[in-house]
Amino acid sequence: MTPLVRQSGRLLVLVTMTLSTRLPAQLPEIAIERRLASELDLAVGDTIRLGPAADSIRFAGVVAAIYEPRSDPAEIAKGEWHLRMHLPDLTRLLGTPDRVDRLSIGLRGGISADSAAARLNRSAYGYRAHSSRVIASESSQTFRVVSRFHRAIAIITIVASAVFLLCIMLLKVEERRLDAAVMRFVGVRRRTIFGALLLEAVLVAALGSLLGTGLAYLAGAATNAYYRRFFDTLLTFSLITPDIIWFSVMLSLVLGAGAGAVAAWRLVHTKPLVLWGRG
């Protein structure tokens, strides 16, 4: 098999043996991310050589496991691959013993992460301890900006759709001018005409909300199918929750009823002769 060199993060990976070759047990064990294993056509038991640079690929190890990493929105677009090693093997590979970039500390139940971080920061220098909540908050700033941007777009869309809906309802009611005039001539009360038009607007809004919910589910499923295949991940890119559906349906009914009420009020307060075209 011709050696295949691929770069993953700061490490270079050199595949030197065929898939059928099995390695001595004394070689260090390495866990490979599924996407990296698929890209390099690796299987459990294969030999790989690693190095921090192209001219120093000297560390040999055996693939002991292939794992599926937890989906992380902050990592999905970086295009990075990962592998896991025992800490002594990693320090020997990098040539930096007793040195780490970062580490995580687990706390027992009932211990405050903020107080533990503050106590560690007072104990020594050369490092900085943070709680996982603070780290998550800092790393999610980009997503907060995107969320605010989406919220602004949603508000503009709702306002524009409300104006458009009002115009549609006014045009729809204008088509009923002759019907309303006839009902007024035969003695039908304004309240009855107003209620009928309002009920029609609510029914149209309810039907539109049902169709919109179905289209949202279809669009969400298509979005997830495309981007999961594109990024080779199980991450959910489009999520439609019951709260979103409830809010959307109620907003649709309120806007539809409001637009219908305005159009109906304008129609019933117009003189019958004007509606008939004789005024």
Image (tube, rainbow, N blue to C red):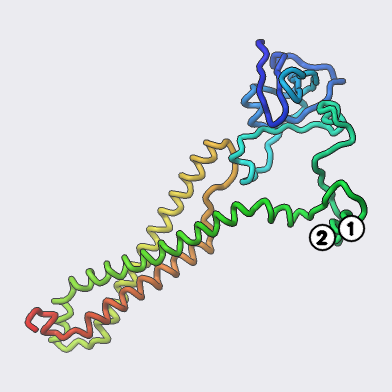
Judge from the rendering whether residue 252 lies leftward or rightward of residue 29; answer left or right: left
Judge from the rendering whether residue 51 lies leftward or rightward of residue 217; answer left or right: right
* Residue 66 against residue 203 in the figure, above or below: above
Query: Mark 1 belongs to which amino acid?
Result: Arg
Which residue is situated farthest in the right direction here? Answer: 123
- Where residue 212 appears, x then y in whole percent? 40, 58
C-alpha distance separating marks 2 and 1? 9 Å
Which residue is situated farthest in the left direction here? Answer: 278
The residue identified by callout 1 is 119
Query: Mark 2 belongs to which amino acid?
Result: Asp
Judge from the rendering whether residue 254 lies leftward or rightward of residue 87; answer left or right: left
Q: Quadrant of the N terminus?
A: top right
* Residue 9 against residue 57 in the figure, above or below: below
Judge from the rendering whether residue 104 lies leftward or rightward of residue 178; answer left or right: right
In the depicted view, which residue is nearer to us: 150 or 168? 150
* Residue 26 against residue 116 in the figure, above or below: above
- Where residue 49 appears, x then y in whole percent? 75, 20
The image quarter containing residue 266 is bottom left
Say which element carries label 1.
helix
Label of residue 114 in the image: 2
Pick whichever of labels 2 and 1 is earlier in the sequence.
Answer: 2
Identity of the residue drawn at 10% across and 80% down: 276
Count all numbered tags in the image, as a single digit.
2
